Amino acid sequence: MADEKDGQYFKRPSTASKWQNFKSFLWNSDTKEFLGRTGLSWLKITVFYIIFYSCLAGFWTVMLVIFYQTLSNTEPRWTLSSSRIGDNPGLGFRPRPPESNIDSTLIWFDATNNDTIKHWVNNLNEFLEPYNYQRNVSSCSASQGPTKGGVCYFPIGDIGSKCSASMNYGYNTRQPCVLIKLNRIFKWQPEPYEKGQYPSDMPDFIKNTYDENFIYISCDGENAADKDNLGDVEYLPSSGINSYYFPFINQREYLSPFVFVRFKDIAKNVLINIECKAWARNIKHERADRLGMVHFEILAD
């Protein structure tokens, strides 16, 4: 017995061409439908989506406003050990290689060729320019730090002429000066070592003159051969950075304190791997992640 489907009748297949079917889909004059919908149907669905997306946009706008109310324009939400940066500062150095070779850490120059030292001198000049125009700063001391929200004056003049622009920072005499600074970490404060309780690998010149009011910087060759080729090192204005420059709390006029390291008699035509470290009780040294230290190379022709 044949299946019976109530209410359904045989409908002759359309003999219209594809083009005629497409035109009928665009506008069906019999049913008054445009793209398969009547005018009333299009009105209803349009009103629905306007209301739906308006509510959606309003919801996310309210959520975004609430989220921004939890943020500060001057202070990160997560700081120190709870932040991605952490609470162990790294070091930075200047001059940096050209942007075309930005991944490099090599400082290469020929002391007799001004073209090879021009970039290094200009890079240092550019970095140091703000230090020549310090404003709204305080003269600080071990007993008197900056005013609330203020910054301490960095005595750029105390560096002297050996590492100055007028002397090309020593690059034309094969006595290059490299600037070493601590990277900024919001609210990080250095902790001094207890008297006599110094790390075994701390250089003697720091142990013998240690002052709890300073963070010290030391530079040396990474390997035995590098140490031999590095020669004598001089720190200007001294090997220490006053602790009253910390913490950094996003002060407008803040400039990172630094130490100039002057390599007085490096070997010629030898690639020297150099490692500089910062010394404070809450600075750990890890070579793999460059924590508390910085690496660069010098090649002087």
Image: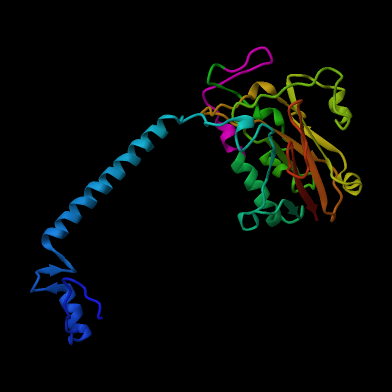
Q: In this view, does 280 lie to the left or right of 255?
A: right
Q: Give the range drawn in magenta.
A: 128-146
Residue at (17% x, 83% y) in the render: 20
Q: Is residue 147 left or right of residue 281?
A: left
Please determine whether, in this image, residue 89 is positioned above or below residue 25: above
243 or 261: which is nearer to us? Answer: 243
Residue at (61% x, 32% y) in the render: 82
Q: Residue 256: tell me if it is visible.
A: no
* Location of residue 97 in the rendering, given as x and y in whole percent from the top left corner: 67, 52
Report which quarter residue 241 is drawn in.
Answer: top right
* Location of residue 273 in the rendering, given as x and y in whole percent from the top left corner: 81, 48
Q: Residue 87: tell me if it is visible.
A: yes
Please determine whether, in this image, residue 291 is positioned above or below residue 22: above
* Location of residue 229 in the rendering, given as x and y in whole percent from the top left corner: 89, 47
Report which quarter residue 227 is drawn in.
Answer: top right
Image quadrant containing the N terminus: bottom left
Q: Is residue 26 left or right of residue 192?
A: left
